[in-house]
Amino acid sequence: MAGIPGDVTAEVQGPDLPVTVTKEKISPCVYQFCYVPDRVGIYTVHVLCDGQPLPGCPFKVAVTDKAQVKLLDDLAERQDETGRLSLRTGQQTLLRFNIDRAGPGVFKAEVLSPDGKLPVHVDQQPQVAILSFQSNTEGDHYVHLYWSESPIESSPILAYCPGPQLPVDATRVAILGKGAESGRAEVRTEFVIDGRKAGPGVPKVVLQGVQTTLPVEMKPLQYDRYRCAYTAPTPGGFLLYVYWSDVLVPKCPLKMTVTPKGDPRKVKVTGSGLGGGIAGLEWKVLVDTVDAGPGDVTTQFHDDREQNVRCDVTEPAVGQFQLTLFPVRLGLHRLHVTYDGSHVIGSPFELFAGPPPDPTKVQVFGPGIEDGIVGEFESRFLVETQGAGAGQLAVKIRGPRGGFRVDMRRQTQTERTINCRYDPSEPGEYEISVRWSGVHVPGSPFIVHLAETRDQLDRLTNERGFLTREEKMSGWRAEI
């Protein structure tokens, strides 16, 4: 507030109780007042100067919460397989919303169809708002929802209208999916009968083999479509008959071939991701089905709470599938890989997601990083990586040219303690660099002085730091 002489104050009354107000002086004549509403409702703001209200006071402020506008209708039975709300041509669509806890606001809606905006009606009651509209145009519709001019969380709702009903015409039925052409023995196979352009007919399916007729499951979808599924027990040839209201669909019967299922025993699963890794980073796994015959790869990736974890699958080459895993939580994960419904060898794979590498937790100790005498020198030292997270150990040593060799070993593949040894044969200064995932661990690089005698060692130790750059750079030996 500016240009008002005197003591300026403010008071805010909430729906039930007064609200704390803070005051900050921005400049000699400018004040900033702040308060935090703790619930929805009408707040009354009084601004006073020397105890007297300013013109226009009190001010009324409506506090709302759009997150409390909740859809009451369960749309699961009214959605198609892509999640779109299915609209009935020429019929009213009703959507009900609970607004009881959203505060003093106004519910509005806008429906966009392929032909533009549709007329909408909103009946806003104290606790419920009811939206109604009607569509007659085929295509996607977008239902935008607002509370006090702000979009609510569920907005927009994507809907689809199939358009005006057409007369029954079996010639316009489409049979979609590879399952109408081929299948594999013992593998559930699907195809779709699409009658959107064929009118409201009744489908019938017959799958006739040489010696038997296979049962076919039919599940109705939205918009006069049906998902069909069958499982052939053995390989062979079949004829697929599809009828629409007792009229045979053109081009039927379709010739189908059922081949043997893929052999999961011949699927190879490789890649660095099988060894686990760091949570929050991508892991890569390759599934090779080239030798397993035709089949479908299915994957599931779970964390230690059995929650699904993102797993992307691509096919960079025929029969080779690249899995990209995205672990988030620390702990044990399981990767399920199936081929034509059967687990491949090793599945489910147990993978551990560890924390990011922490070089500060790596410890290096042993006589090999201390000064000594050539001939008596014990060059062994240990690198302990317990608690340092997943990472890569790199040890590099430089010293007199050709004066040693380096060896690194661990007892098992999962062992966190690495035994290191180098066998120096010449006196001089040795620099041992120990890095964990590219970063020096505490104390690295370690400087080791070797001498031929005790007197030389004492003298060499006293002179450390005076070696020439050429001497320091002479010779590298590394073992990773």
Image (tube, rainbow, N blue to C red):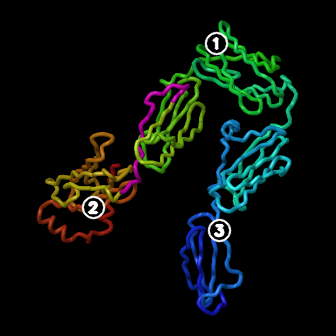
Say whether residue 357 is magenta: yes
Where is 55 relative to 89, above or below? below
User: Dot 2: few (<14), some (14–19), or many (≥20) neighbours within 10 Å?
Assistant: some
Judged by depth in the image, the label closer to the viewer, 1 or 3, is 3
Circle 2 residue:
446
Front one among 189 and 110: 110
Residue 458 lies left or right of residue 6; in this view the side is left
Q: CA distance from mark 2 to mark 3?
A: 70 Å
Let me know if residue 249 appears in the view: yes
Which residue occupies the extreme top position in the image?
211
Judged by depth in the image, the label closer to the viewer, 2 or 3, is 3
Q: CA distance from mark 1 to mark 2?
A: 72 Å
Where is 360 relative to 391, above or below? below
Q: Secondary structure at mark 1?
A: strand
First in sequence: mark 2 vs mark 3: 3
Q: How many numbered discs sit on the rendered protein?
A: 3
Q: Hey, what amino acid is under mark 3?
A: Ile
Circle 1 residue:
236
Which residue occupies the extreme bottom position in the image?
5
Front one among 450 and 220: 220
Q: Quadrant of residue 136?
A: top right
Circle 3 residue:
42
Judged by depth in the image, the label closer to the viewer, 1 or 2, is 1
Q: What residue span does the magenta drawing correspond to?
A: 338-358
Q: Quadrant of residue 15?
A: bottom right
Let me know if residue 178 appears in the view: no
Q: Quadrant of the N terminus?
A: bottom right
Residue 274 lies left or right of residue 153; in this view the side is left
Q: Hey, what amino acid is under mark 2?
A: Phe
